Amino acid sequence: MDGASLRGTPGRGYRWEPLARSWLAVTLCALFVSVGCKSAQHVAPEPSTLARGGSGLSGQGDPLPSWNEGPTKAALLDFVERVTREGGPDFVPAEARIATFDNDGTLWTEQPLAVELAFVIDRVKALAPQHPEWRHQQPFQGVLEGDLKAVAASGERGLMQLLAATHSGVTTEAFDVTVKDWITTAKHPRFSRPYTDLVYQPMLELLALLRAHGFKTFIVSGGDVGFMRAWAERVYGIPPEQVIGSRAKLRYEVRDGAPALLLLPELDLMNDKAGKPVGIQQVIGRRPLAAFGNSDGDFEMLEWTTSGTGPRFGLFVHHTDAEREWAYDRNAHIGKLSRGLDEAPRRGWYLVDMKKDWKVIYPFEQ
Amino acid sequence: MDGASLRGTPGRGYRWEPLARSWLAVTLCALFVSVGCKSAQHVAPEPSTLARGGSGLSGQGDPLPSWNEGPTKAALLDFVERVTREGGPDFVPAEARIATFDNDGTLWTEQPLAVELAFVIDRVKALAPQHPEWRHQQPFQGVLEGDLKAVAASGERGLMQLLAATHSGVTTEAFDVTVKDWITTAKHPRFSRPYTDLVYQPMLELLALLRAHGFKTFIVSGGDVGFMRAWAERVYGIPPEQVIGSRAKLRYEVRDGAPALLLLPELDLMNDKAGKPVGIQQVIGRRPLAAFGNSDGDFEMLEWTTSGTGPRFGLFVHHTDAEREWAYDRNAHIGKLSRGLDEAPRRGWYLVDMKKDWKVIYPFEQ
């Protein structure tokens, strides 16, 4: 089953309508609508020096060496110290130390386009030889010819066709292999490096700090769960069972004696905005202690997390570094942060000012 | 929102139709249809002596002291030894050591009726004062008067009403409190003990053995996920994020500034039969190494697990002890094991003969 045959199957029309509100549809729309627009500025990165600060937990040296000293770093260290201090008023037993992280824009770069969009485009190109009809059929024709305006003109239905053609009709294990192959060969257009090089060094340090203090770290992101699971363990040390994402419905089948799970062209969970607390409850079953995001798509996750009783922590990564990464917030097509920026102060959420707070953006700068 | 008001809400009819195939509907049907039937025999339990065998891993004494020596115990110990022997041909890295356990009939007793059914009945009684109309309205009237034939006569729609009235219309946190209250006070009709006393000592030892050897242990059961999470950590040492069950849809809401997740009267996942591999993939994202069940509802979980490459383990608990517990399989209304019994030998799955293999059934026998 593939996008083309699905389209031609009577009575089995697309059922990804809920994706109207989805991250991928929205970002696809944004991407194709904004072709040629300058939604974020960037220049060549300037390598930073890696200085080591003196602060830290338990006198073990600085656990967050890529973070500049300041209120955000201090608050992170203070929070971890408080919830792990046995006998202290804010102590939280290890089993309740759950931290959730958005992925795109929070753990790795999401500009100039969400990484999974690059995957969609590359997959359409790779599958095209098996689909000669795509040469004359939008939105596939537009993708193949680089005519993104034509893709955008195909509207939501066209975008759903792209998703179905690249994310369903295969088994979960085949999809995993496809993503693993792609992620090791595809290159980021600006940095000419694998996308997995473009993770944020300060966030890797934060993940390690939390885990060293008994936290279980989860990804809770809008991207497809199978897409993220294919590399999250290698890159972040986060195993598949701690990755929560958007997902297609699955069907268990036994073909010629071999069981398989088939990805269907129907959305099962849209793990964005109000879908994030739902995904968290479905998979984790308890409220996180800390949540980290970078856009309004993470607002409800931070809201749900920090409205629990006892010590909680909420943080947005604010993209303020147009030189080393990108600078964007309220008017961004991808990763818009507006309500979060307005409400963070009164809700007690922290804002990382990437330019000021991070000595290093990427591991390769070191 | 509760069952009564839901019934009276135009245009918001029940959407638990998929439960037609569900464990709870099936067992509710079975329960009410079989009233007065003898689907399983039992007599007073006879305390067993707890002898310690000499076998075991790493010479640390017997890690499965409640298991009699025999091929099943030997196979379990051998499997754990093989997959954890570094450098050995069957070695599996710790992160892939996933073991999944059905709950009802595999980790605790499911006779004479599934524990969650007792909860449903008790909840209807507890909620009845707020619903005077239930005195004249089936299936509630039948539950309140102990007229289970009338309940059965209300059919599937009636059973769905019972589920909606007892499992939805409240927040996840309120439901958790309700279950925690109930589980600490309700008593099993035969043993006059809390239901959580009726867990299987040999399976507790197996859970501990696996965890001591780097396995992550998950519950993958047909019961409601919130019902199981409320006590699984205390009783089995299995945290909420490692409990996979059937679940209702959720809606994230902010009421008067307080966020909550509301349980809706609509099924989101039926975690039984072919739904078990789906639940496993959604939450865990990789194929288990070992799976443990007791009924045909676990068949697909064992099939999916043991058809993976490399060493795998599948096991059914076969209820053969009419004295200490219950004896049932092919003709059981609850926990039917027929296809599994037929196919276990050729698939290489083990069968626990409870009467022969287990020295002790429950912890309190010790």
Image (cartoon, coloured by chain):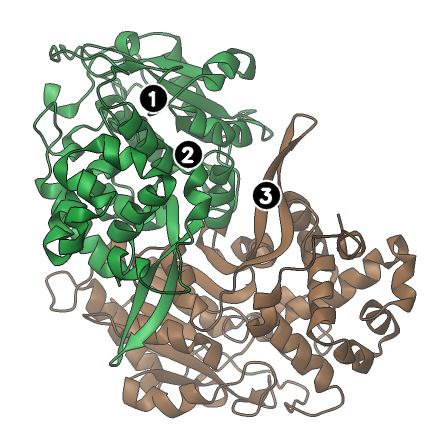
Chain colours: A brown, B green
Tags 1 and 2 both on a single chain:
yes
Closest to the observer, B200 or B22:
B22
Which of the numbered marks, if any, corresponds to residue B99? 2
For disc 3, the chain is A
Q: Which residue is label 1 attached to?
A: B58
Q: Residue at x 76, y 51 (%)?
A: A9
Horizontal side of residue A5 vs A216, given as left or right: right
Q: Residue at x 27, y 69 (%)?
A: A80
Q: Position of residue B51 (x, y in %)?
A: 17, 10
Instruction: Give the CA separation, mark 1 to mark 2.
Output: 21 Å
Which of the numbered marks, if any, corresponds to residue A251? 3
Q: Amino acid at mark 2?
A: Ala
Instruction: Give the CA separation, mark 3 to mark 1.
Output: 42 Å
Q: Amino acid at mark 3?
A: Arg
The image quadrant of residue B106 is top left
Q: Residue at x 30, y 18 (%)?
A: B59
**Depth-wise, is mark 1 or mark 2 nearer the camera?**
2
Q: Is mark 2 in CB contact (under 8 Å) with mark 3?
A: no
